[in-house]
Image (cartoon, rainbow, N blue to C red):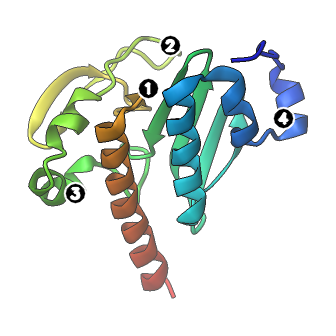
C-alpha cells in the first residue's frame, strides 16, 4: 500500500476518481485483488461504478443505483442498495426463496448493519430480514458487507444479479 493521498471531498468531486485507481492506494494483497476483481465483474455486467462522494462509488444499472462501494485504509465495503427507501427493491425478502435455496441466508444475516449512530438518523429501527427479527438496524444501510471474503462476494454477486433482473423487468414493464 502506498502513502495514501487524502484528497478533500471538493478535490475528489473535481477529479471524479476511478475506483480502480484508488483501490491500490488503500488495500494490499488478497483484499486488493478481491476488490479489483469485484469492480471488474461489475463493469463486465453493465454496472458502472462512478464516483459518488469521498472514497465512495455508486454503481447504476439501467439508471437505478443498485450498489455502493466504499474504501478506506485497509478496508472496503459493499452495500447493495436494498432498503425501505428504494421503492423498486425495498427488502431482501423479495429474494427470500433464492437466497434460502442457494444457502446464502446465513451470509446476509451475518451482515445486517446495526446502527452505529454515524449520522443524525439514529437510532436504528426494528426490521425483519428473511424471517429473522433484528433491533436497532441502520435504516439507511441495513445490510453491508465489510471486507468481504469469497463466500460474501459470491453472495453479493447473486444478490446483484437478482436486483439487475428486477430492474430489467421494471424497465420492460414501463415501456
Residue 161 appears in view: yes
Toward the viewer: 111 or 125?
Answer: 111
Residue, disc 4: 13
Residue, disc 2: 118
Looking at the picture, how far across and down is residue 14, in whole percent? 90, 36
Question: Residue at 66% across / 31% down in the picture?
Answer: 23
Mark 4 or mark 3: name the one nearer the start of the chain.
4
Q: In the rendered view, does 107 fall on the left or right side of 48?
A: left
Mark 3 or mark 1: name the one nearer the start of the chain.
3
Mark 4: few, some, or many residues within 10 Å (few <14, many ≥20)?
Answer: some
**Cβ–Cβ below 8 Å for labels 4 and 3?**
no
Q: Secondary structure at mark 2?
A: loop
Q: Residue furthest bottom?
A: 175
Residue at mark 2 to residue at mark 1: CA–CA distance = 19 Å
Mark 2: few, some, or many residues within 10 Å (few <14, many ≥20)?
Answer: few
Residue at mark 2 to residue at mark 3: CA–CA distance = 28 Å
**Cβ–Cβ below 8 Å for labels 2 and 1?**
no
Toward the viewer: 124 or 18?
Answer: 18
Residue, disc 3: 95
Looking at the picture, how far across and down is residue 125, in whole percent? 28, 24
Mark 1 or mark 4: name the one nearer the start of the chain.
4
Amino acid at each position: 500500500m502506498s502513502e495514501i493521498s487524502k484528497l478533500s471531498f471538493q478535490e475528489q468531486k473535481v477529479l471524479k476518481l476511478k475506483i480502480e485507481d484508488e483501490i491500490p492506494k488503500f488495500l494490499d494483497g488478497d483484499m486488493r485483488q478481491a476488490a479489483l476483481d469485484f469492480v471488474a465483474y461489475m463493469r463486465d455486467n453493465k454496472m458502472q461504478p462512478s464516483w459518488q462522494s469521498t472514497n465512495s462509488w455508486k454503481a447504476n444499472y439501467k439508471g437505478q443505483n443498485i450498489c455502493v462501494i466504499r474504501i478506506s485504509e485497509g478496508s472496503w465495503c459493499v452495500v447493495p442498495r436494498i432498503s425501505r427507501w428504494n421503492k423498486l427493491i425495498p427488502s431482501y425478502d423479495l429474494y427470500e426463496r433464492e437466497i434460502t435455496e442457494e444457502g446464502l441466508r446465513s451470509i446476509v444475516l451475518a451482515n445486517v448493519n446495526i446502527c452505529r449512530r454515524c449520522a443524525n438518523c439514529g437510532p436504528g429501527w426494528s426490521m425483519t430480514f428473511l424471517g429473522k427479527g433484528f433491533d436497532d438496524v441502520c435504516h439507511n444501510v441495513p445490510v453491508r458487507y465489510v471486507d468481504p471474503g469469497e463466500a460474501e462476494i459470491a453472495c453479493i454477486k447473486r444478490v446483484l444479479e437478482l436486483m439487475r433482473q428486477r430492474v430489467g423487468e421494471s424497465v420492460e414493464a414501463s415501456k
